[in-house]
Amino acid sequence: MTTDSGGERPTPALAGIRVCDLSGQLAGAGATRYLAAFGAEVIRVEDPTNKGGWDIIRGAPPFVDERRGIDMGGGFNNHNVGKWGVTLNLRTDEGKEMLAGLIRTSDVVTENFAAGVFARMGFSYDALCELRPDIIYVSNCGFGQTGPYREYKTWGPIVQACAGLTFDAALAGHEPAGWGFSYMDHMGANYMALAVLAAIVHRNRTGEGQWVDIACAETGATLTGTDILDFGVNQRPTRRPGSVDSNRSAHPAMAPHGIYPANGEDAWVAVACRDDADWAACRTVIAEEWAGAAQFAHLEGRLAQQDALDVQLAGWTCTRDRQQVAGLMVAAGVPAAAVALPEDRIDHDAVTADWGLWPTVHHSLMGDVRVEGLPVHLSRTDWAIDRGAPCLGEHNEKIFRGLLGLAAEELADLAERGVL
Amino acid sequence: MTTLPQPRPGPGPLFGLAVVELASEQAAWAGKLLADLGAEVTLVEPPGGHATRSIGPFVDDRPGPERSLWWWHHHTSKNGVVLDLDTGAGVELLGRLIARSDIVLEAEQPGHLAARGIDRNDSMVASPALIWVSVSPFGQEGPRAQDPVTDLTLMAGGGPVWNCGYDDHSLPPVRGLGGQAAHVAGVHAAMATLAAVVDRHSSGLGQHIDVNMHAALNVTTESGSYEWLVAEHTVQRQTGRHASVSPTSPTQVQAADGRYVTVGFPPRHARDYQAILDWMEELGLGSAFPDRVLLEMAVERGGVSIVELGQDPIVDQIWSAGRAAMAFIAAHVDARTCFDGFQQRGIVCGIVNAPEEVIADPHFVARGFPTPVDHDDLGRTVTYPGAPMLFSRSPWRIRSRAPHIGEHQSGLPGLLDASE
């Protein structure tokens, strides 16, 4: 075992944890990616009969240099860095037996199939326990393994709509804008990683494994909690005219508080005055007569006149560069930010660059590709991301020889017969 | 029908871990996750209570430090003590509290604690197993470490806002409500904390964890980031669906009752098209849908496959007709009928619920998601959002309502008596 001394890299935080991973997309793959970054050995098991196509982003754009193929999906690479990849045809008895072999030697089993699918393959929680009594099993799907909607199909936007998150993202007087990405795939993955880690903590203390069932729609509903309490306590529904005006802030009450147009095409800047002192500083930056009006000096007045205030402020911001506005406001102590395009925050952002947020990995076919890092740094056993996602079945030999003791000839025969 | 193992009443998976949390807006969610998972969280506030107790809405709309629903939601299962960290005695007591804890969780402005004589490094030297978690907008170091922020400016500068909004780009992009910047950073803080706890099981050592909110949001935009990282493409926001490099067809439809549904991916299988035709017939709409013949064609040809899109003009027409047929039905039934009707026919569809509709939804109720919490002080039982994930052996649980100011001061005899 390595130690801190002598400049050696310490043993990774999750060294010795083996995850037999049948999950995919982002809601599942994002969880095991996190565990792999901290040193867990994640073995991703895919179906050779459809070339891993169950994970719809495996061969989906974006592509490096427009090179297409089932191993070339840019999103898939991002979500599966640091994992080992094997194939098993789970419609065959031999494939199932090999999966059972992997599970016997794993600490954790993860999957995000539709509800009930894994059990129908023969891998119910009880069956997993027979293979390994202290197994940690985490299942993750939109509505969970039980309840009236367990057969309902979902993907990120469906989950977000059903969970209340879509409703809570809108401008007043407009239909829901929702979330322009699968927010709940990210958060579902995060909670799935949290579930695995909490279950490991419990197992290390008690020796017990367990089953954790995640319904992403429930996870999402915890993220609108104050609205749910407001209804339960004050009988005030969110579904009422004007209640959702996302770029404003009712709690805590702030004004001005919005996303304002800046000079240029589709250029925007967010400004938030937390209190009267922020407004006084903001007013000084603006340095125009309207901003000095007595009616705006105090929060009550600004809230009462918020539409007029927003029109005036937009009139000031719209002739100016978004970065310049944000810079002036922040220098004056007022929270502000240009609405960042991907290019801004990935290629021209000192904070993300200094953080090392966009590491480069090596992928066997794609070559060197930048991916997302983690937003945390641990002082002793930090994460590391350097190996790209596995190509389909790329590590069959390494894993099946190393863990199951199969010989090269046996593997060739299994591949020949469509088991791998 | 799948049933989950009946959870045993008993401690959560983090039972036995002692956490000191310094009250804050940005680390409160991480603290709640740890507390509801069974850790013993001691929440430290200044005399008079922390400023976040003034965040509304309030019980019966009457402000007061014990009436903030934000405070209630974020501080379940925690114990509350008051320490005046502007005094030497308070600092000394905090040091003693830290010395007997496993984890410190704080979101103070970087450098602020050290300036008050609370030195993280000293604590960690004195307690080598201590895990100290710092949540901050831009990390503990760097040029922006002291910049002022709010949820809006973090979401705008960190990436999510660029993805969200409407097809009409004269409208500003949209920030989803709910305090999601702190939610994203909070779950990352909790995940990293547990990775460090698992590490400590083998190493016996703690460490410092630096959680960067800006970085957390940067890795929470799905293809917003990886389209740029892989191919330098920029996604563009669209109403109620994913931001995309190339425009996609609308998926959000207003149902006959004025509520919205999201119909997502058009059907592919012949059985789906037949189900749509049959449902139209049942609704008496059989002849009213103009492209009925295309649906019948889809049935006859055994469905359509995605790979045929763009290759065969008829397939493109069928694909569009499938989407139009779903929207057509949606516009003729109420949102609830639409959601259940499509899902029960095996076709994916979502309903845009308001948060209060989620907590009353039969599926969530059947799974036990609505969670009663006793507010003995007010003589009320209040329904909270429940478990974000179901543990079979060591259940997630709200053990108590959020603490009053100094409520558990006397519960730590010998440690805090001297503060009197």
Image: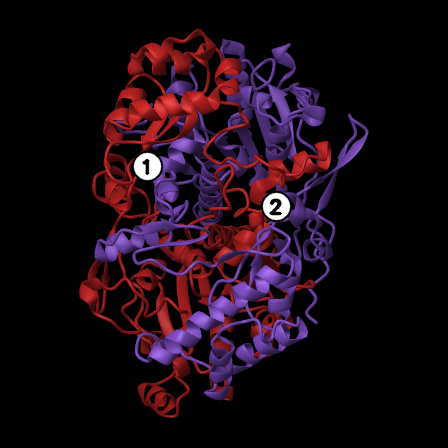
Percent coordinates x, y for residue A88 in the rendering: 43, 80
Q: Is residue B184 left or right of residue B309?
A: right
Q: Is residue A90 visible?
A: no
Q: Residue at x 54, y 29 (%)?
A: B21
In the image, the chain rendered in red is A
Q: Drawn colour of chain B?
A: purple
Label 1 resides on the chain identified as A
From this view, report whether residue A228 is shown above or below residue A218.
above
- Occupied quadrant, residue B417: top right
Q: Residue at x 74, y 50 (%)?
A: B9
Percent coordinates x, y for residue B335 in the rendering: 62, 57
Q: Residues within 10 Å of mark 2 (few under 14, many from 20)?
A: many
- The residue that disc 1 covers is A339
Q: Which residue is more in the foreground, B44 or A224?
A: A224
Q: Is residue B420 left or right of residue A48?
A: right
Percent coordinates x, y for residue A221 in the rendering: 59, 47
Please, which residue is most extreme toward the right here?
B379
Residues under numbered marks 1 and 2 in contact, where contact means CB atoms less than 8 Å apart: no
At mark 1, the secondary structure is: loop
- Occupied quadrant, residue B59: top right
Location of the N terminus of chain B by quadrant is bottom right
- The residue that disc 2 covers is B354
At mark 2, the secondary structure is: loop
Q: Residue at x 71, y 45 (%)?
A: B371
Q: Is residue B80 visible?
A: yes
Q: Which residue is more in the foreground, A36 or B173?
A: B173
From this view, report whether residue B272 is shown above or below residue B402.
below
Q: Is residue B109 left or right of residue B177?
A: left
Q: Residue at x 28, y 55 (%)?
A: B227
Location of the C terminus of chain B by quadrant is top right
From this view, report whether residue A414 is shown above or below residue B213.
below
